[in-house]
Image: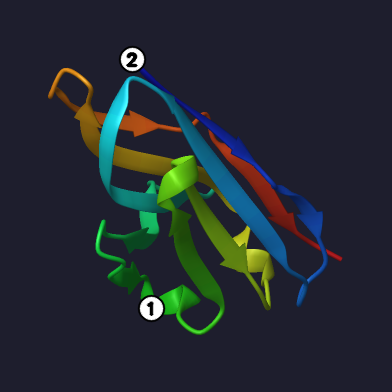
Amino acid sequence: QVQLVESGGGLVQPGGSLRLSCAASGSIRSINAMGWYRQAQGKERELVAAISSGGTTNYADYVKGRFTISRDNAKNTVYLQMNSLKPEDTAVYYCNLQGLTFYYVSFGSWGQGIQVTVSS
């Protein structure tokens, strides 16, 4: 079983920065794709950024140039550095990791979600 723990959310003023972290633990052999999603109130969950095992990144157009996704494979952790935050970035942010357990079983796990609020 794989568990994800997110941290780093909170309240920030427009133009400010936050760094989200998502740490995975459990019977993990390898982690392939890592990603961050968000869900604003009344809206569907959407992809914010993703990073492959080889380090290739992909961003939603509305965060390009402002957000940076990175990963630390030794720590089974993915990060999302968010700069120049806007009120429309307000949402619950979820991490998603996909990989293999020690028993060569594929897994896809979600974090519990963490609130990010951008407001003056």
Q: Which residue is most to the bottom?
A: 65
Q: Earlier in the sequence, mark 2 or mark 1?
A: 2
Residue linked to disc 2 = 1
Image position, residue 10 (x, y; %)? 76, 48
Location of the C terminus by quadrant is bottom right
Observer-nearest residue: 12 or 71? 71
Above or below 115: residue 108: above
Callout 2, which amino acid?
Gln
For residue 88, which quarter of the picture?
bottom right
Residue linked to disc 1 = 61
Residue occupying the point 31% across, 27% down: 28
Question: Mark 2 against mark 1, which lies toward the viewer?
Answer: 2
- Count how many numbered circles sit on residues in the image: 2
- Label 1 residue SS: helix
Callout 1, which amino acid?
Asp
Residue occupying the point 40% across, 49% down: 73
**Colour scheme in use:** rainbow
Above or below 92: residue 15: below
Image position, residue 57 (x, y; %)? 32, 70
**How many C-alpha atoms fall within 10 Å of the one at disc 2: few (<14), some, or many (≥20)?**
few
